[in-house]
Amino acid sequence: MLENRLVLTGVVREKPQIRFTPAGIPIASFHLQHHSIQQEAGHPRKALCTLPVLFAGESVQERMQQLEAGSRVRVTGFISRANHRHGEYRLVLHGQQIETIAIE
């Protein structure tokens, strides 16, 4: 298996929305806004992005219950296309772990 792992910290932009698949699996979604200064070629560079995040599974509701707009979190997961439409290349972070982090 090839590696596909992403760890991203940021701010939750809106309270997570929970929906259910036709099979009854809960899926939570929200947008994560990231802002940092990274080093590239020996120089500081602003890194800014907003990614949609999805969490699926039975524990979604209890994991998302504490999250509000403005919550600072660290999400670990993998990235994939948003859907399987031809020509669609938006990326989604499929979360596997989430933790609230303190404001630095």
Image: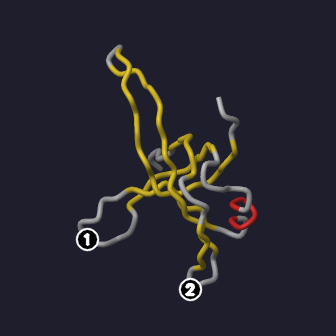
**Left or right: residue 27 compared with residue 38:** right
Residue 15 point in image, percent of width and height: 61, 61
Residue at x 59%, y 62% (from the top left corner): 55
Callout 1 amino acid: His
Counting other residues with Cα less than 10 Å from the Cα at mark 2, is it few (<14), some (14-19), or many (20 or more)? Answer: few
Residue 31 point in image, percent of width and height: 50, 56
* Quarter of the view holding residue 91: bottom left
Q: Earlier in the sequence, mark 2 or mark 1?
A: 2
Residue 53 point in image, percent of width and height: 52, 57
Quick one: SS at disc 2?
loop
Counting other residues with Cα less than 10 Å from the Cα at mark 1, is it few (<14), some (14-19), or many (20 or more)? Answer: few
Residue at the farthest left position = 87
Distance (Cα) linking label 2 and label 1: 23 Å
Up the image or down, 99 lies above or below 22; here it is above
Residue at x 25%, y 71% (from the top left corner): 86
> Which residue is label 1 attached to?
86
Residue at the farthest top position = 42
**Left or right: residue 76 compared with residue 81:** right
Callout 2 amino acid: Pro
Residue at x 73%, y 57% (from the top left corner): 66
* Quarter of the view holding residue 22: bottom right
